Amino acid sequence: MNGTSEQATDGFAAAPIGGEEARRLIRHDAGPALEALMERARKVREAVHGREVALCGITNAKSGRCPEDCGFCSQSAHYPEAEAPVYPLLSADEIVEQAKAAERAGAREFSIVTSGTRISGDRGRPGLEDAIRRIRAETAIEPCASLGLVGERELSRLRAAGLLHYHHNLESARSFFPNVCSTHAWEEQLETIRAAKRLGFQICSGGILGMGETPEQRVELGEALRELGVDCVPLNFLNPRPGTPMASLRVLTPGECLAAIAVFRLMMPRAHVFVMGGREVTLGIRQAEVFRAGADGTMVGNYLTSAGGAPDSTVAMVEGQGLALRPPATGRPWAFRGEVPHEADWNRRAVEGEPKSVLRVLR
């Protein structure tokens, strides 16, 4: 246990709240009730995770032409009016250089993300494995990958290459998932997460809130993640993308976002809770409050297909709350020296690439 608080000694901080209480608290999204909820979550975060915040940078290493029909995603080939860059898998050299840039900007973790159901056969895997080996050898950063629905054989090879974290979001509650995607089943995602867990990966799994689900279904997602025993919960808030089926949905209010963060923290005290995509759009000037609501991690740099906040502003936001950046746990010297660029010099192609035209769906 890191850090101390008045709750650290009585065991309260490590005791998760139950589903019934969570369903009641997630409705506390304004006024004194929200303030009390956030203060409770802050105390738990400090008791279990101390006063450090981890930053995660990503690269969209293969973009567009995805055969899945996830309604939130502009990379889906089912939505030709949605604009997203299209390019093949990046080289190992480019992935490694981006990881180094993210590390210099304060990232503890770096995730390699690819579009599509999975990386097909042996076409991309050797390059990815090479990139992972080099990231482990040449940086201190903790490598993560989000490569879709992969099996134990592929995961074993990634593990042997040195991958530490595997990311695969459930996206939403089982009861709501048919409204999100029809091309694969919610249960298929469980199989990937369980396989990665059996192999000893740190599991990163969360979802996107604000896709039309009820607050109670957000709790249902939290219950599923808790049952899986995930190590990190990335919470995204829908930033509706033009041309997708969810383009016209309203964005969540800051209070709804903060209440959800706090409830996920109280449901899973020992998990790392990261606030990721949609932070700027939904929270606006209240972004810094995510840490008071219980988050102990956030994104630095650009998102998959949209620009993120300036890296120097993200680090300043953390430090402005009296918090410090959490270094990697790989035992190697960290390249972060406190000098953070204003422009993210990694994952730039994801927001500068050519928009897609009408594309044939590839499986």
Image (spheres, rainbow, N blue to C red):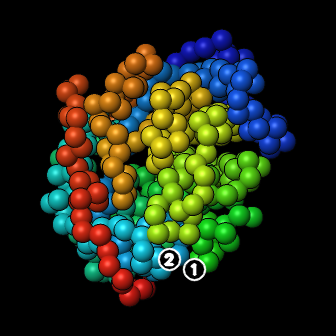
Question: Which residue is labeled 2 in the image?
Answer: 68
Q: Position of residue 121 (x, y in %)?
A: 35, 82
Of pointers 1 and 2, the one earlier in the residue sequence: 2
- Tag 1: amino acid: Thr
- What amino acid type is highlighted by mark number 2? Glu
Secondary structure under the numbered disc 2 in the rendered image:
loop
Name the residue rendered at 25%, 74% in the picture.
Answer: 88
Where residue 96 appears, as percent x and y from the top left, is 20, 54
Image position of 181 with respect to 323: above or below: below
Q: Nearer the viewer, residue 46 or 318?
A: 318
Q: Position of residue 93 (x, y in %)?
A: 15, 60
Of the 4 image quadrants, the one containing the C terminus is bottom left
Answer above or below: position of 276 versus 317. below
Q: Is residue 282 left or right of residue 187?
A: left
**In the depicted structure, whether residue 266 falls above or below residue 85:** above
Q: Quadrant of residue 31?
A: top right
Q: Are marks 1 and 2 in contact (CB under 8 Å)?
A: yes
Q: Residue furthest right?
A: 20
Q: Which mark is residue 183?
A: 1
What residue lies at 60% left-to-right and 57% top-to-bottom?
249
- Measure how far apart labels 1 and 2 are at the Cα level: 6 Å
